[in-house]
Image (spheres, rainbow, N blue to C red):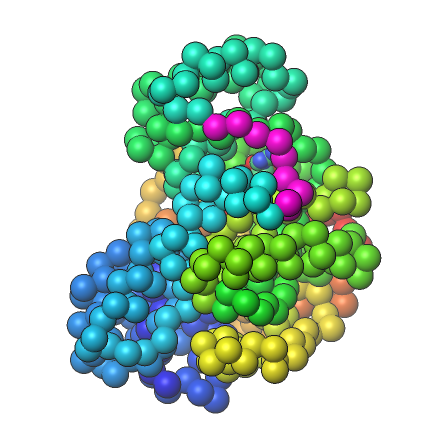
Amino acid sequence: MNILLLGSGGREHALAWKMKQSKLCDKLFIAPGNAGTASVGENININVNDFEQQKQFCIDNKIDLIVVGPEDPLVNGVYDFFKKQEDWKGIIIAPSKYGAQLEGSKAFSKKFMQRQNIPTAGYAEFDKNNFDEGKKYIAQHSLPIVLKADGLAAGKGVVIASSHEEALNVFEEMIINKQFGEASSKVVIEEFLSGIEVSVFVLTDGKDYKIIGHAKDYKRIGEGDSGLNTGGMGCVTPVPFVDDIFMQKVEEKIIQPTIEGLFKENIEYKGFVFFGLINVKNEPFVIEYNCRMGDPETEVVLPRLKNDLVELFVQLCNGELNKATIEFDERACATVVAVSGGYPGDYEKGKIISFPNNIPNGSLIFHAGTKVANDEVVTNGGRVLAVTSYGKNIREAAQQSKNILKEISFDGMNFRNDIGYEFE
Ligand code: AMP
Ligand code: GLY
């Protein structure tokens, strides 16, 4: 099969690396890709949201399968676009535009969870029409208060306010001053849940599902989970508290009702569901849904998945997902992300990256923000590389990644030394 993968981050390098190992994969193209994906397949210069150009490319290059990495094209309706084409009849791993609202609208996902009786934080939604009511709601709300812009806000749309005054300011910023444009014209106000977060990843055809892994991600820039939020500074899997008993609760209370809900509500969905969960006293609650894989979660989930990913995609599209048996590598996996100096604030790009000659013990260097310039690999984003290693436990895997990172350098490079610190 010829495959087109959309995206350009560490997640896409990991997806490309995994798909390239499939016996079903012939040509692999990545749009637009990065310096890492260029070593696995062929990068093509097409924007992830330019569906017309993608379609022409698919026709010209006999693409059989489209796989979508990031949320933007999913929420913009890439699935619906390709499904209605008469001159391209391949398969696409993605939810419908309506289904992608599970990620694209916090209010949509909250209502969905309420209808399906899925455990999540209590909430209310407001816009400019009931703004004053919202202010009263905030004033009597317990602290802290979670405020979420309804739409996509590049991971910046959630604020946890520790005082009523701060919450009122954020509320006004979002709705009246349109801090995130249309995305914050509606705001969800949520009860704060206290616990450890973990993400679970599922492949579904909208009827059946398979769990393909789980991971814990480290979002803060600083060690000990301090400082500003980032896209993710590292990830580990498997997470010790995610034992059989906890997973059974996740399946019964969250995954099964979600997939049944998609089916009952006739929501077309042939792709990934990312369940962002929080463990509150051994009970799982949904913090958010995403309609894609996570980044850097993918960089640990796929290295542990033993199955042929392209074969799973084909089974999914043929209604044969139930026939698949998911198998995992016994070892733990950790990824540690190298970021540009200054990230998540302002940072410079174009720094030359120097790599080690040998990468020991099957470790993997996934590229995120990189590109090739004048025959050199240079930095091209905030998160630059994700170094994934295996180990007999999380500590050993993380240590191995840190050892490799010490052999990598670029001007201003920074990484967290404590990924997986709470675990053995
Ligand atoms: P989201 O974009 O919905 O994933 O939210 C970003 C982050 O905010 C989550 O990963 C959590 O750390 C935190 N968060 C969101 N909602 C809640 C909540 N109801 N209670 C506690 N923390 C939350
Ligand atoms: N690492 C979190 C995400 O991909 O949304």
Classify 15 as above or below 110: below
* Residue shown at the point (34%, 63%) measured from the top left: 79
Give how far across and how far down residue 67 sits, in percent. Answer: 39, 69
How many numbered marks does the figure carry? 0
Q: Quadrant of the N terminus?
A: bottom left
The stretch drawn in magenta includes residue 119: yes
> Bounds of the magenta span?
117-125
Classify 231 as above or below 256: above
Closest to the observer, 196 or 75 = 75
Give how far across and how far down residue 107 sits, in percent. Answer: 47, 37
Q: Quadrant of the C terminus?
A: bottom right
Classify 364 as above or below 126: below
Give how far across and how far down residue 175 sits, in percent. Answer: 37, 22
Q: Is residue 162 left or right of residue 66?
A: right
Ligand 1 quadrant assignment:
top right
* Residue shown at the point (41%, 18%) measured from the top left: 130
Q: Is residue 209 left or right of residue 327?
A: left
* Residue shown at the point (71%, 57%) measured from the top left: 252
Q: Is residue 72 left or right of residue 289?
A: left
The stretch drawn in magenta includes residue 308: no
Give the overall secondary structure of the magenta segment. loop
